Each structure stands twice: as structure tokens, then as C-alpha cells.
């Protein structure tokens, strides 16, 4: 066993034994700070792959009670955020719920696990600022609302991370969850409104000059009762304003577990286009319906899934018109169809 492992085991045992902050930190203020920092470095989740998260939370609670400091509060030049509960793990980042301080609303703080991925968080912030500036404001509910983006220095490890603060979404569930709730396939009449709204969201983004780059089931959120849809995680996006600094127009990274979902131009490191997003959006919907999709719908989808990028549809608004015509032929005039997500 290494000296580092011995030190970690000792730190965990001490944290398990102590009952009061004084038991752990003693009475000397300077020594208390040194002890806190040493223990925090040992049990910090970044250093242990998340295995010591509970111990880290307990250490911070003891420290907070010892000296009145609160390591769960992050203060920026504009706002103050109090982190609550354990983070939710995403593709490359952790999402922390934050209680209202300022601003007075629930937010999520998105922090990359690896500080080297901060450039992808910056890319997301650029996209989420470009969309309301260059896009049609009527469609802003289709994308997350960013409060601010800032650099945060970890008080324990000293690592600098880019953090995006976004208004929290209530009542939304990913297409991954929808797929789990309907393992035999979703009724195409229910998939229809999700598909329509997904094309609206993409049409809005593309007209604003932004490609999403990762239209995957985890990144498409729907609100069952309100038939709402939000396209999240813009870390893999290609904002048009990047053209001067990155003229390649390539999607910057892939989500490994969805490696087989991308059209050929993405793993091939070639320039992406609106047809790239349309390919992935179509894949989301065909996977969701499975064998329940009628033949005409499967035929419609095949045209969007062609390997050759220039043969695929590249205009989401025009494709929406064609989808509406197909749906009317299949199911008649459009009307609201209540949707229920089991177990929620």
C-alpha cells in the first residue's frame, strides 16, 4: 500500500471518529487551517474519482461549524451561490443545484470534472449568448438560459475551472428516461410532438448560426404535461462566431458512450453542418419509436440518415413542413394528445 493510500485511510478513519470540530481541528487557528487543507486535499472527490464525496461533505460541515466559513458558497462579482446536495454527473461535468442567494431563483452550476475541459464550457457559454442575440426570441424557451459564466478556483486543489450558471429546469425529463419508460417503443403519435419541437429548436439554433453538435437522448429534455422541449448541453456546439478563431467548423469532441450515434463527418473530423444535427435528431426519434414507427415514417427518416452529408436535409424548418404533411397523411389534423411518463 502506498503512503498516499495510508494517509487517505487515516484521514477517513479520523473523520469517522470525530464528534466535534474541535476534536479534528484543535484550538490553534493557524494549525486548524493547515489541518483542514491537508485533509481536504486527501479526501477531495477530484483526487479519488468521487469515492470520498461523503467524507468531503462531512469535513466541510465540520469546518463550517468550526470557523463560520462556508466552502459550499461560491461568490462571483455578480452573484452568490450556495451549493446543495450531491452533484449530478454528466458527460464531462458535474451539475450542482444551488439555492437562491443572488439571484433569487434556482440555478444549476455546471463544472467540468477535468479542468482541461474548461474550453468546452466556454464554448457552451458562447453558444448560449449567441442564440438570444442572433436568433428569434420567440424560440428562446427551447434552450437553457445562462445566468453567467465565470472562472472558479478550487479552494483545496487550486485548480481553475470554467463554470456555467444556468436557470434550473423543473419538470423536464430526457429522451433517455422516456425510452426507459417505454422499452417496447413509444407510440409515434406521442413521438410526433417531440420530433416537431426538436426540429423547431434546431431550426431556431441554425438560423442563429449555431450547430448543437450532440443531439443525443441525454441532451433532449421534454416536459410531459406542457409538451415542452429544451435542448441542453451546448459544450459540443459550433457557434458561428467561432469561425474567425476555428474555421474548421468541426464538432470539438464526441460523447464516448454514444460513439455510434454520430454521422460520419463527426468522427471523421470533417466540417459539420445543420445536416449533422438533423441526422442525430432523427436517430433519437427512430430509436425512441423502435418497431412502432409506421413504414412511411421510417422511409422519411432514412432520407435524414444518409451517410453522405450533402444528400441529407439541411433545413430544419423545411423538414418540419414535410414532417407535418406526413403526420397529417398518417393521423389526420393535428390536435393535442396528452402524454404521461410512467413512474414520474
Image (cartoon, grey):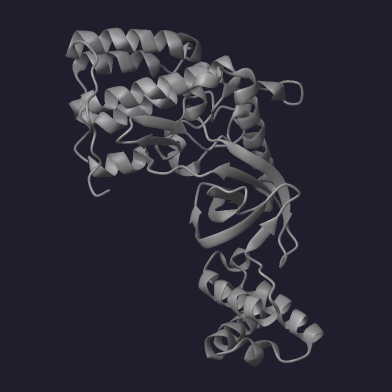
Q: Is residue 181 visible?
A: yes
The structure residue drawn at horizontal position 55% and vertical position 49%, both measured from the top left corner, is 108
For the N terminus, the quadrant is bottom right
Asked which quadrant contains residue 43, the reply is bottom right
Please provide percent x and percent y for residue 131: 60, 24
Q: Is residue 167 left or right of residue 218?
A: right
Residue 38 picture location, percent across and down: 72, 78
- Please, which residue is most extreme toward the front here? 104
Q: Quadrant of residue 123?
A: top right
- Give how far across and how far down residue 107 sits, in percent: 55, 48
In this view, the residue in front, 130 or 43, is 130
Query: Residue shown at 65%/30% (left/top)?
Result: 129
Residue drawn where x is 32% and y is 17% of the image: 301
In-front residue for pair 58/47: 58
The structure residue drawn at horizontal position 72% and vertical position 83%, both measured from the top left corner, is: 35
Decide: is 165 above or below 273: below
Left or right side of 62 for 231:
left
x, y percent for residue 181: 25, 43
Quadrant of res 12: bottom right
Amino acid at each position: 500500500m502506498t503512503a498516499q493510500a495510508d494517509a487517505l485511510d487515516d484521514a477517513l478513519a479520523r473523520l469517522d471518529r470525530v464528534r466535534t470540530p474541535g476534536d479534528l481541528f484543535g484550538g490553534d487557528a493557524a494549525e486548524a487551517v493547515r489541518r483542514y487543507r491537508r485533509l481536504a486535499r486527501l479526501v477531495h472527490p477530484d483526487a479519488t474519482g468521487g469515492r470520498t464525496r461523503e467524507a468531503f461533505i462531512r469535513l466541510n460541515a465540520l469546518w463550517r461549524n468550526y470557523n463560520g466559513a462556508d466552502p459550499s458558497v461560491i461568490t462571483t462579482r455578480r452573484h452568490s451561490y450556495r451549493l446543495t446536495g450531491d452533484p449530478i454527473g454528466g458527460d464531462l461535468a458535474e451539475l450542482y443545484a444551488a439555492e437562491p442567494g443572488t439571484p433569487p431563483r434556482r440555478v444549476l452550476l455546471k463544472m467540468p470534472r477535468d479542468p482541461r475541459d474548461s474550453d468546452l464550457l466556454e464554448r457552451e457559454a458562447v453558444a448560449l449568448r449567441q442564440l438570444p442575440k442572433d436568433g428569434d426570441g420567440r424560440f428562446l424557451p427551447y434552450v437553457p438560459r445562462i445566468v453567467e459564466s465565470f472562472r472558479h478556483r478550487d479552494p483545496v486543489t487550486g485548480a481553475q475551472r470554467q463554470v456555467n450558471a444556468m436557470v434550473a429546469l423543473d419538470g423536464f425529463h430526457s429522451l433517455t428516461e422516456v425510452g426507459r419508460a417505454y422499452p417496447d417503443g413509444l407510440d409515434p403519435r406521442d413521438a410526433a410532438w417531440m420530433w416537431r419541437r426538436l426540429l423547431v429548436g434546431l431550426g431556431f439554433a441554425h438560423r442563429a448560426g449555431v450547430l448543437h453538435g450532440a443531439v443525443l437522448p441525454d441532451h433532449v429534455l421534454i416536459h410531459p404535461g406542457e409538451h415542452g422541449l429544451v435542448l441542453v448541453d451546448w459544450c459540443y456546439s459550433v457557434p458561428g462566431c467561432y469561425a474567425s478563431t476555428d474555421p474548421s467548423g468541426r464538432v470539438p469532441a464526441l460523447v464516448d458512450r454514444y460513439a455510434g450515434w454520430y454521422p460520419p463527418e463527426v468522427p471523421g473530423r470533417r466540417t459539420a453542418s445543420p445536416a449533422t444535427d438533423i441526422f442525430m435528431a432523427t436517430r433519437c426519434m427512430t430509436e425512441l419509436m423502435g418497431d412502432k414507427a409506421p413504414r412511411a415514417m421510417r422511409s422519411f427518416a432514412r432520407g435524414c440518415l444518409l451517410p453522405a452529408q450533402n444528400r441529407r436535409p439541411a433545413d430544419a424548418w423545411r423538414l418540419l413542413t414535410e414532417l407535418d404533411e406526413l403526420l397529417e397523411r398518417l393521423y389526420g389534423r393535428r390536435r393535442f394528445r396528452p402524454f404521461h411518463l410512467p413512474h414520474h
